[in-house]
Image: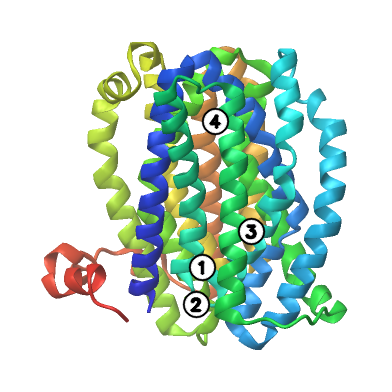
Amino acid sequence: MILRSTRLILFADALSLLSSVVSSLVGARALGPAGRGDLLIVVLWPPFIAMLAGLGLPTAYRYWIAKEPQRASALFSNAVIYTAIIGTVCIGLADLLIPYLVGERSPEVMMLLRIYQINIPAALFLDLMRGLLEGTRRFGWAGAARAIFFGVQAFGFAVLWFAGHLTVATAMISMISAQTVAMGLALFAVWRQLKPRWQPSWAEFKTSMNYGARDHFGNVSDFTTLRLDQLMLGAMASNAAIGLYVTAVRLSEVTNLAGGAIASALMPEVAASNAGEEAEALWAKSLRLTVYMQTLLLIPLWIGAPYILKFLFGESFVPATSALRWLLLAAAVWSWGSIVISGLRGFGYPGLSTTARFSAAIVTAVALLILLPRLGITGAAIASFIGYSVMFVVALVSFMKKRQLRFWKCLRPQRQDILIANWKSVRAFLFESA
């Protein structure tokens, strides 16, 4: 089952990645480093606000519906009510707070930033619906909802570019449209696949919050570790520096594709199992495969970093080379850590996953305060690498201790790990249905 789930997630993520690359290429060439930085400032904060507002509920939805599918109606109904109330409140709070967090920006950027805040409820509801779909292992639908966001965005960017009308404002409108379409598709998928009835439940909400609250601080820490560099750059750096950095970030995230797919498929598989030796073996194999893949990707991308930037984005983006190389290292460690975090969640230890991610967030924040003023975007990239390394080490030690496992026994390479050594495994992974 996990092969089929991973395959679906990987396919959807590949489509999302392809569309994201198209958007990045078109946006970078049309807007330049400064315009790309302005666009990031406009669109960076609403997803963060939506994540904060979720209070860990998307993860709780994945966990509980994987264990008890009959909860679908109550979880869906609660999601609708929660989004309507909390999403509206968050728009008002964001309008008051965000202008003070982005530094001195042009009047146009500030106006667009306020307009883009209407995306907060849509992003929150999409996260909750994807939690239901992924928890029931409808990864095809969940992946489609994610992929269509990037697809609509890329199509909009391309059309506007060819028409000569791609600006920060029109790019923002394209992204609002993409978010709306993605939310609508996720809602349709849940309605069709799970057939929920209107059944709000306060008891169900408290149960979900009990799990979500324990994991939420970790979600916030995870997002902080992942995006604190960009949030701080948005307040401290020039538009051009922000544009260079976000381009390097998008390229480095390409290498997370397979690791992220495996981690997403692993959590509900473990949660739905009896959490015994078979589940532990599945987790260990997933981690080993991710280590192999990231190591193989890292070497050629590290060497070719300046040539990739020049070929894809133009000469003006080559100064991002040093940052990109450090971000490639950070992405590799993040992928390894995501497998361990997924294991902690699936085995029912959200508190331990929170500890690991909170530790990473604290270390990242301190490293950014020290390195960002001294080394600029390269310092931000190094801080990310340090933070992800802390997350991985803390999570791995916690998992090994909690499950009473031996480090070398879990990570010792095994011949059957290498899919390419077994054609039947390759064929099953790529083509066969579960």
Q: Could you tell me the amino acid type at mark 2?
A: Val
Q: How is the image coloured?
A: rainbow
Q: Quadrant of residue 117?
A: top right
Residue at 31 percent of width and 61 percent of height: 289
Q: State which mark lies toward you, 4 or 2.
A: 2
The image's mark for residue 127 is 3
Question: Which quadrant would the C terminus be assigned to in this image?
Answer: bottom left
Q: Earlier in the sequence, mark 4 or mark 2?
A: 2
Q: Which residue is mark 4?
A: 383
Specify the amino acid type for callout 1.
Gly
Q: Are marks 1 and 2 in contact (CB under 8 Å)?
A: yes
Q: What is the spatial separation of the Cα atoms under label 3 and label 1, in whole angstroms?
A: 20 Å
Residue occupying the point 87% across, 32% down:
96
Q: Sequence-wise, which precedes: disc 3 or disc 1?
A: 3
> Which residue is rendered at x = 66% and y = 26% of the image?
232
**Residue drawn at the location 70% of the way across and 50% of the way down:** 51
